[in-house]
Image (cartoon, rainbow, N blue to C red):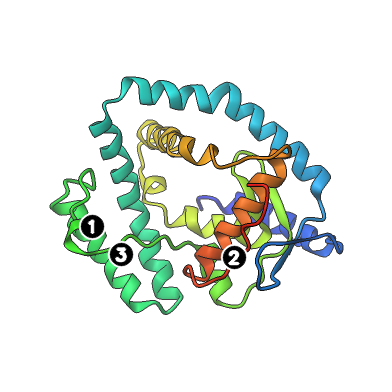
Amino acid sequence: MKFASAALILSVLFSGLVSAQDESVVEISSEGQYVSDPWEGFNRAMFSFNDGLDTYALKPLAKGYQAVTPDVVETGVNNFFGNLSDVNSTLNALLQGKGEAAVESFLRFTFNTTIGIGGVFDVATPMGLPKHEEDFGQTFAAWGVGPGPYVVLPLFGPSTVRDGVGLIPDALVDPVNEVDHIRTRNSLIGLRIIDSRAQLFAAEELLTGDDRYVAVRDAYLQRREYQVNDGEIEADYDNDF
């Protein structure tokens, strides 16, 4: 089965990490919510590895992609992958009991796939169907699973134990991974990575402060809390970022 080995490895890894956590915590909201960061040494090393990979590979590729790709094509590519993500959002909205969000995500996928020519054109938003971003990490949170310690995953970047485990079912329902032709599937995965990286250039400018590790960690945790609570939080943004 696809991803079975990865699922087993990640499950064992995260089980060990959970049992090893200590009292190191990071406050991420004015509501007194905390996420532990007991493996800061490992996380910083992995952060440096990912940062080096980004600096010498992903960022140049993303800049080159933006330089040679017309804006209308870049928008179409982003719309295409955004449309595919509505499949996962539909499923997770259902699992969280968010009926309206599930219906809207399903209708978005239906209209954008048909009228929008495979999702290249976003016709759903002008029709009054808002975009919902739901994943299994958020679903686990809705089921009462705590975030667990903060962890920086190789290649994937900032995460928590809960969100890291959630990557496994996210991958299992990803339409791209269902493409049988290996070269086409790998090309789509590569294009999505480059497109996603290109979308982050504007967000990078918001990360300030002397310690980029802390800035990225806090920004990620704040954003995930916002997503898990559907924006209904009173976050404390009095941080370096």
Answer with left or right where residue 81 lies relative to residue 51. left
Within 10 angstroms of label 1, few (less than 14), some, or many (20 or more) residues? few
SS at mark 1? helix
Mark 1 or mark 2: name the one nearer the start of the chain. 1
Question: Residue 204, percent across and down?
Answer: 54, 38
Q: Which mark is residue 82?
A: none
SS at mark 2? loop
Residue at left 86%, top 62%?
22
**Which residue is under mark 3?**
105
Question: Residue 86, percent across and down?
Answer: 34, 58
Q: Residue furthest left?
A: 115
Mark nearer the viewer, 3 or 2: 2
Question: Residue 138, percent across and down?
Answer: 53, 66
Q: Which mark is residue 125?
A: 1
State the residue in front, 161 or 56: 56
Mark 3 or mark 1: name the one nearer the start of the chain. 3
All told, the count of numbered labels is 3
Within 10 angstroms of label 3, few (less than 14), some, or many (20 or more) residues? many
Q: Which mark is residue 235?
A: 2
Separation (CA) of disc 3 from disc 2: 27 Å
Q: Amino acid at mark 3?
A: Ser
Image quadrant in which you'd find residue 222: bottom right
Mark 3 or mark 2: name the one nearer the start of the chain. 3
Q: Amino acid at mark 1?
A: Thr
Q: Residue furthest front?
A: 238
State the residue in front, 176 or 112: 112
Residue at left 43%, top 68%?
92
